């Protein structure tokens, strides 16, 4: 997932809405369970996200999927009969705040953690959850977060940036048959990792280096020179690793102005509806974003019903408006269900037992794809679930909410 | 706060871990101490020295990275990494401070901001060294043999370091460095006049505060075990500044009070967390405008109000009985000196000679160039043409600080005292260049430093007695009435054992009684052996005191000689009385 | 590429000019200046986007609002400090910094982090026209010309009676009091004027830089660099320096990795200042003793 994506500002209505939804769903008939158990015990999940600070409005909507999962799970009786409850922690999206947040959760006896968001934030957090033996799933895509030797209690339920980079390179090389590619990446952890992975895979597939690599500072105020450099180098296709809507807008506008519209592949935040206001439509015709196969349709394949259902629910979330694709790509929905599965399999909420169960998960059908964990690998998503989708297909009536049309041949 | 109070606070701090439940509270307490360490240094630089730095977050980053990389990549032990971090950050601080030699203070603040951004960028770019975005992972806890300093032990370690820093900083502030820093902040010209090299002082302040920031950074890295470039944002620099201002700029206990308030505030805010930055911004604004002395200042004001003793206003008795050391007098020769400001000539081809040990007066109507001449002699203005020889040595082009160090001291038209220091501390400022104890000796309060401090104070006291103000030695200089301020300036100049003393309109604003006292004082000063040059309006005073007089008019020499010859000279009379009935004093000209 | 530099340079110059305007009578620097520019851009974009008013009306309202905020800044953060006995030291550094924090936080909360489109004034557009080897848009031409016009206008202003009074305060605040000049009133006027220029900088920067909250911080540094390198107080110098900095940036973008780009401009400006502390066209100051 992206670290610094820009999102439209959210109101408070989503939280209220979900509360209402939760209250409503609790009124649904519940399976028979011991009343006493429900009343006393809850299953607490640490919920780390920024509610204050500059990135609060960007990161807040990303947890919508997780909250929907919790409502669904509670409506179905909870985990081992216990109601799932979030223990909110504001980390201000600051890596420096993570130790304090984790210590607070630890003091409160919480062993399961969702969040934080962002690569440096998760890294800092892991330094404390690992020795504290707290099972965690945050939003970050660095590959080594799936390394169970380093982080035995962390479970990665999203693709890694490496996988993203590879998918982009592979599509350029194998499907579009382009040999001269250009890279436009922001100078951030995300940009760098994705860029490196792209270069590596492209070299492996074609033996070529990119014709031009343009790295711009996160504070850049104008991307036209970089775009110009790419054009001047004779690039036939461009891969962009940009997390910032301003920059995305600038880049495409620059291309439109220079009347140069090669095929472009990028990160999932290209699916931001706000882009259609910032950039002329013709600049987005040949643009594809990396996406989860389960969220895409083709002429013949439909999106799985569970995804359809989740898309419908996400469409009601006010703060996710226009950015449903990113929210859909977040791991929390799957992680909560995985926890439920593991806990119920282990018949215990003890961390060691649950960990064992999680490590044994094979072929689990999640919303984002098929998840496989093992004792040595906690990187759940495989390359077969990573694909590309068309950005312009947002305008297609078949694309509902987070759903997009798969790129040809992807 | 006395010794007892300090021990009580220390005791509470030591015992605190036993009272805390859970890991979170201990973590926060440790973080507070790390913060305090950094703010202690920033308070010295910004609070006492007046150099606003918006880049200390970057210095903490340097310290953190040096320590972390040292321990993780090079296997250094913490006990090596810590001093290394301090040295490394000190160097970064020196680099950051170099521009101050040429640039003024507020430019400097923005330079610190710029530097901070550059350092942030470099943390990412110098990837082979810093690991770029991946950060440094796995920073180990300090160990001694098999024992690891974690949890409470780490807290006590940080506490020990913080307390040591508190003592050292306190020693520095109480010494000549503290006085000089406050001069730098409040009245730089006074500092220059006392021969203090402000540039070197700024560097020293910056390096010291950088070293503390580096120590804080090392502790930060160890506590976090993982550091990335994103840990150190511009916000961090702003927070440090906020804490210093909150506690009270230039207050001894400002850092601790500020850090406590800052860390406790979020706990109290709870629901208002969203408005955190707004509250910080508003708080910073209100404090700077309405309570520049912060919480500590407010507390001290309250304490002072209750502690104020009713003291009778002392009558300054100018005494000439003084077992003071003899001073060597230097002769002064000014040859063909000219100075113009833009198109306006202030002083043109001026020459005069003052024999060693005598009293000489420079008089003239307003705008005649008297004060300009004084500024030229003391090096405050650069000379366009000509030579100025002090004891045969041409001082043109030397610069005011160097000239002051060589025994030329002065007073100013408007007395330049440091309001935040006491009277005697102001006087001691004049002895800055003579003090021998090194910074290290002062920092560690070694015997030689302590002895010298006592000697210097006694010396300053003797000069205060000389000017008759010894009863007011410990009063804040800001409360002294105007006439007496001038006397303090004179005492300060004398402490510097000048061979040439220049007084700029010392009689201005004095009552008749005070004038008599001044006359006696100057005679006594001359009696010590130093050469005295007075720029004056009061012709009676001049007539009484001076052995020779130079009269200026519109920047040129009008007459020179003994008071009698000069005051009866027709040109002089014309220049002063003019052709007008009123006490016409020549048309106003350019800078006088 | 040259056009790029001239465009960005014009914006930096404008920010630098708004800095100079305040500096003259007060010898202070408003650390909230960058955020004022940012607010100008965002306010104009919001008015155009939400209220759908015609461009010149939106621009006019923006200028008025920003000037008002600049006036409040002076009233609340600068005047009380300057009128302290002894000039208040450098307290204004922190107080204006605080104002900047406040503006940024409030705007961020209201508008969110997303950028907004800000179109150029109606007859102009950002469409590129080919003029020989370069492509410029009518907007860019107007911008560059406009900045020069503003400088000329300001120079005329400083020749006026009020303008000269402002310069007098810069020389010697106390002396000008003796001459019946009210430094506070003129300082207030200068702040308002700087607000006007800042608003214009923001409105004109919008089409190129996009209106987003993050704009404030980078423009603050660039504006300071332009003003300092040009010679604080000299508007011509600022324009020159603004172009020079923008040119450096464009060249650095070509050749260097991002982390070094900021460093290059900063080091270049710093070196210039070390060699010539008064900037390209500033006057050497004299100590007043």
Image (spheres, coloured by chain):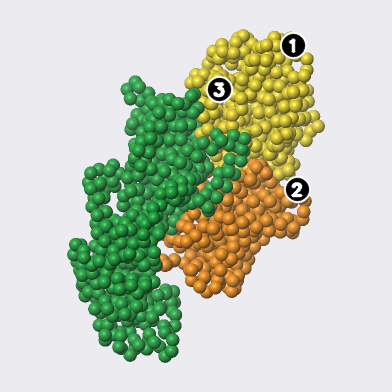
Chain colours: A yellow, B green, C orange
Q: Mark 3 — residue?
A: A108
Q: Chain of mark 2?
A: C
Mark 3 or 2, which is nearer the eye? 3
Residue shown at 62% from the left, 62% from the top:
C193
Residue shown at 35% from the left, 48% from the top:
B173
Is A72 left, or right, of C37 in this rendering?
right
The quarter in which the C terminus of chain B is drawn is bottom left
Is A206 left, or right, of B392 in this rendering?
right
Q: Are marks 2 and 1 on the same chain?
A: no
- Sequence-first disc among 1 and 3: 1
Residue shown at 31% from the left, 77% from the top:
B541
* Image vertical order of residue C100 relative to residue B355, above or below: above
How far is mark 2 from mark 1, CA to CA?
A: 50 Å
The quarter in which the N terminus of chain B is drawn is top left
**Mark 2 element type:** helix
Q: Are marks 1 and 3 on the same chain?
A: yes
How dense is the environment of label 1, judged by Cα within 10 Å: few (below 14), some, or many (20 and up)?
A: few
Q: Quadrant of residue C190?
A: bottom right
How dense is the environment of label 3, judged by Cα within 10 Å: few (below 14), some, or many (20 and up)?
A: some
**Mark 1 element type:** loop
Residue A325 got which mark? none
- x, y (%) of residue A309? 76, 23
- x, y (%) of residue A212? 57, 40
Q: Mark 1 — residue?
A: A31
**Among all residues in the image, which is located at the extreme right?**
A397
**Mark 3 element type:** loop
Q: Mark 2 — residue?
A: C50
How far is mark 1 from mark 3, CA to CA?
A: 30 Å
Is A94 left, or right, of B399 in this rendering?
right
């Amino acid at each position: 997932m992206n670290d610094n994506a820009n999102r439209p500002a959210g109101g408070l209505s989503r939280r209220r809405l979900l509360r209402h939804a939760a209250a409503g769903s609790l009124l649904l008939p519940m399976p028979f369970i011991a009343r006493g158990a429900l009343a006393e015990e809850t299953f607490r999940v640490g919920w780390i996200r920024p509610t204050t600070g500059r990135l609060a409005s960007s990161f807040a909507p990303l947890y919508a999927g997780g909250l929907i999962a919790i409502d669904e799970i509670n409506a179905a009786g909870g985990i081992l009969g216990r109601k799932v409850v979030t223990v909110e922690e504001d980390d201000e999206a600051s890596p420096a705040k993570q130790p304090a947040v984790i210590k607070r959760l630890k003091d409160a006896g919480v062993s399961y953690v969702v969040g934080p968001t962002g690569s440096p934030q998760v890294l800092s957090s892991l330094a404390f959850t690992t020795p504290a033996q707290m099972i965690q799933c945050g939003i970050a895509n660095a590959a080594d977060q799936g390394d169970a030797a380093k982080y035995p209690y962390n479970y990665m339920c999203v693709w890694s940036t490496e996988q993203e980079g590879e998918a982009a390179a592979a599509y350029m090389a194998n499907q579009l048959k382009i040999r001269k590619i250009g890279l436009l990446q922001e100078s951030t952890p995300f940009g760098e990792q994705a860029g490196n992975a792209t270069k590596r895979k492209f070299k492996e597939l074609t033996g070529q280096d990119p014709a031009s690599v343009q790295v711009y500072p996160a504070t850049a105020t104008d991307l036209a020179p970089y775009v110009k450099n790419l054009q001047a180098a004779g690039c036939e296709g461009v891969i962009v690793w940009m997390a910032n809507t301003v920059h995305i807008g600038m880049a495409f506008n620059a291309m439109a102005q220079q009347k140069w519209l090669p095929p472009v592949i990028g990160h999932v935040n290209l699916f931001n509806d706000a882009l259609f206001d910032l950039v002329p439509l013709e600049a987005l015709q040949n643009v594809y974003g990396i996406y989860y196969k389960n969220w895409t349709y083709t002429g013949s394949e439909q999106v799985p019903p569970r995804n359809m259902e989740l898309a419908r629910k996400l469409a009601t979330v006010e703060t996710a408006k226009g950015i449903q694709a990113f929210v859909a790509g977040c791991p929390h929905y799957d992680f909560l269900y995985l926890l439920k599965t593991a806990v119920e399999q282990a018949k215990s909420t003890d961390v060691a037992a649950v960990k064992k169960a999680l490590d044994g998960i094979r072929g689990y059908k999640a919303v984002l794809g098929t998840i496989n964990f093992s004792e040595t690998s906690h990187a759940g998503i495989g390359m077969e679930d990573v694909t590309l989708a068309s950005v312009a297909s947002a305008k297609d009536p078949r694309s509902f909410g987070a759903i997009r049309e798969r790129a040809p041949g992807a | 706060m006395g010794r007892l109070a300090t021990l009580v606070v220390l005791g509470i701090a030591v015992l605190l871990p036993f009272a805390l439940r859970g890991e979170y509270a201990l973590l926060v307490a440790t973080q507070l101490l790390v913060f305090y360490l950094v703010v202690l240094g920033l308070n010295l630089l910004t609070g006492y020295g007046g150099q606003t730095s918006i880049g200390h977050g970057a210095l903490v980053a340097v310290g953190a990275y040096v320590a972390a990389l040292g321990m993780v990549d090079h296997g250094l032990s913490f006990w090596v990494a810590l001093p290394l971090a301090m040295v490394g950050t000190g160097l970064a601080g020196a680099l950051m401070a170099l521009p101050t030699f040429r640039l003024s203070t507020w430019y400097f603040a923005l330079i610190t901001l710029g530097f901070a951004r550059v350092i942030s960028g470099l943390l990412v770019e110098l990837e082979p060294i810093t690991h770029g975005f991946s950060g440094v992972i796995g920073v180990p806890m300090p160990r001694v043999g098999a024992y690891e300093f974690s949890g409470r032990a780490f807290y006590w370690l940080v506490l020990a370091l913080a307390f040591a820093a508190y003592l050292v900083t306190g020693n520095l502030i109480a010494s000549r460095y503290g006085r000089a820093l406050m001069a730098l902040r409040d009245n730089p010209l006074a500092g220059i006049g006392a021969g203090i090299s402000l540039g070197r002082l700024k560097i020293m302040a910056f390096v010291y505060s950088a070293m503390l920031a580096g120590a804080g950074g090392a502790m930060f890295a160890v506590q976090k075990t993982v550091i990335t470039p994103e840990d150190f944002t511009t916000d961090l620099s702003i927070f440090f500044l906020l804490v210093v201002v909150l506690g009270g700029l230039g207050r001894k206990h400002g850092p601790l009070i500020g850090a406590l308030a800052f860390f406790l505030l979020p706990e109290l805010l709870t629901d208002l967390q969203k408005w955190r930055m707004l509250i910080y911004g508003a708080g910073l604004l209100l404090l700077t405008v309405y309570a520049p002395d912060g919480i500590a200042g407010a507390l001290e004001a309250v304490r002072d109000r209750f502690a104020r003793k009713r003291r009778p206003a002392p009558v300054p008795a100018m005494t000439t009985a003084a077992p003071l050391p003899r001073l060597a007098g230097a002769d002064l020769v000014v040859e063909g000196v000219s100075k113009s400001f833009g198109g306006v000539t202030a002083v043109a081809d001026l020459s005069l000679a003052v024999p060693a040990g005598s009293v000489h007066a420079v008089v003239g109507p307003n705008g005649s160039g008297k004060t300009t001449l004084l500024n030229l002699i003391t090096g405050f203005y650069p000379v366009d043409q000509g030579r100025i020889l002090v004891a045969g040595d041409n001082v043109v082009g030397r610069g005011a600080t160097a000239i002051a160090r060589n025994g030329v001291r002065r007073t100013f038209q408007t007395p330049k005292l440091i309001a935040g220091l006491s009277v005697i501390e102001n006087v001691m400022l004049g002895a800055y260049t003579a003090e021998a104890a090194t910074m290290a000796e002062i920092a560690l309060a070694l015997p030689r430093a302590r002895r010298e401090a006592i000697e210097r104070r006694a010396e300053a006291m003797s000069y205060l007695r000389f000017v008759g103000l010894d009863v007011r030695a410990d009063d804040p200089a800001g409360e002294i009435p105007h006439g007496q301020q001038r006397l303090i300036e004179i005492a300060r100049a004398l402490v510097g054992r000048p061979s040439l003393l220049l007084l700029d309109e010392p009689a201005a604003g004095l009552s008749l009684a005070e004038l008599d006292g001044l006359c006696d004082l100057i005679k006594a000063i001359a009696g010590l052996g130093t050469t005295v040059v007075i720029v004056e309006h009061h012709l009676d005073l001049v007539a009484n005191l001076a052995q020779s007089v130079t009269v200026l008019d519109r920047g040129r020499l009008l007459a020179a000689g003994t008071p009698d010859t000069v005051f009866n000279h027709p040109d002089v009379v014309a220049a002063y009385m003019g052709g007008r009935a009123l006490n016409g004093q020549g048309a106003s000209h350019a800078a006088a | 590429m040259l056009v790029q530099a001239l465009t960005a340079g014009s914006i930096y110059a404008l920010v630098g000019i708004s800095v100079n305007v305040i500096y003259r009578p007060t010898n202070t620097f408003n650390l909230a200046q960058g955020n004022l520019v940012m607010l100008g851009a965002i306010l104009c974009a919001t008015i155009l986007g939400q209220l759908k008013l015609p461009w010149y009306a939106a621009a006019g309202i923006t200028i008025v609002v920003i000037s008002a905020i600049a006036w409040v800044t002076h009233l609340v953060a600068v005047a009380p400090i300057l009128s302290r006995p002894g000039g208040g030291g450098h307290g204004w550094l922190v107080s204006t910094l605080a104002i900047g924090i406040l503006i940024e936080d409030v705007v961020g909360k209201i508008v969110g982090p997303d950028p907004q489109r800000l179109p150029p004034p109606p007859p102009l557009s950002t469409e590129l026209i080919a003029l020989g080897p370069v492509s410029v848009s009518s907007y860019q031409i107007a911008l560059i010309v406009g900045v020069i016009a503003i400088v000329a206008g300001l120079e005329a202003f400083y020749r006026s009676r009020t303008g000269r009074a402002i310069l007098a305060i810069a020389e010697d605040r106390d002396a000008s009091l003796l001459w019946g000049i009210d430094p506070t009133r003129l300082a207030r006027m200068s702040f308002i004027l700087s607000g006007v220029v800042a608003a214009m900088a923001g409105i004109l920067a919008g089409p190129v830089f996009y209106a987003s909250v993050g704009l404030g911080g980078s423009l603050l540094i660039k504006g300071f660099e332009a003003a300092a390198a040009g010679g604080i107080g000299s508007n011509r110098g600022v324009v020159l320096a603004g172009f020079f900095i923008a040119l450096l940036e464009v060249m650095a973008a070509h050749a260097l990795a991002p982390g070094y780009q900021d460093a290059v401009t900063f080091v270049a400006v710093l070196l210039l200042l070390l060699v010539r502390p008064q900037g390209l066209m500033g006057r050497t100051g004299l100590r007043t003793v």
